[in-house]
Amino acid sequence: MDPMIVAGAIACLGLSAAGSAFGTGFAASAAVGAWKKCYAANKPAPFILLGLVGAPITQTLYGMILMFIMLGKDKVTGAGLACVLLGVFAGLGIGLSALFQGRAAAAACDAQAETGQGLTNYFGALGIVETVAIFTMVFTIIALGSIGAK
């Protein structure tokens, strides 16, 4: 297997996963703080905050999908450099989407725990941030489809 293709595939997965790690970490920290406030006020702690915490994890799946497609380009001569470039830039786009989705989810955790209102709006906002990652994945798949096409 061409090491450049493997490098691009792993870069895409790794950068996507790094963004998910940051995003879920930010959101989890906020959820724990929000639950603490609820417990201190003798209010029920909203379990739904786990849904907000988990939102940025899907970007790792998008990176994995691209990784498998890139690894499938092994039989295409000269695909290595393209896969490295696509892997790095797609991974960055997807990973940054996860990071900022986690930042938004952190704010949503705090707001939901404090007010008990607006959950649909919070998930809607997170969905818009998620769309950046989905677009990045789809457009990268289109670009990968042109590699080796005649």
Image: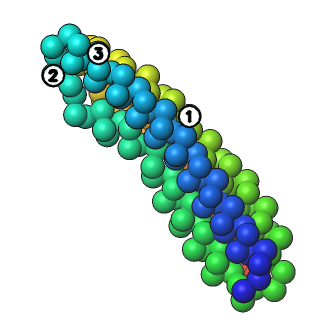
Q: Earlier in the sequence, mark 3 or mark 2?
A: 3
**Rendered position, 5 above or below 51:** below
Q: CA distance from mark 1 to mark 3?
A: 24 Å
The mark found on residue 44 in the picture is 2
Circles 1, 3 touching at the beta carbon (< 8 Å): no
Q: Position of residue 68 (x, y in %)?
A: 57, 74
The colour scheme of the drawn protein is rainbow
Label 3 sits on a secondary structure element that is helix
Q: CA distance from mark 1 to mark 2?
A: 28 Å
Quadrant in the rendering for residue 73: bottom right
Question: What's the residue at 56%, 34% (across, down)?
Answer: 100
Label 2 sits on a secondary structure element that is loop
The mark found on residue 37 in the picture is 3
* Image depth: mark 1 or mark 3 in front: 3
Q: Is residue 94 left or right of residue 58?
A: right
Q: CA distance from mark 3 to mark 2?
A: 10 Å
Quadrant in the rendering for residue 46: top left
Question: What's the residue at 45%, 49% (across, down)?
Answer: 57
User: Residue tagged by mark 1?
Assistant: 100
Q: Residues within 10 Å of mark 2 (few under 14, many from 20)?
A: few
Asked whether 22 or 112 is in front, the reply is 22
The amino acid at mark 2 is Pro
Q: Position of residue 18 (x, y in %)?
A: 59, 49
The mark found on residue 62 in the picture is none
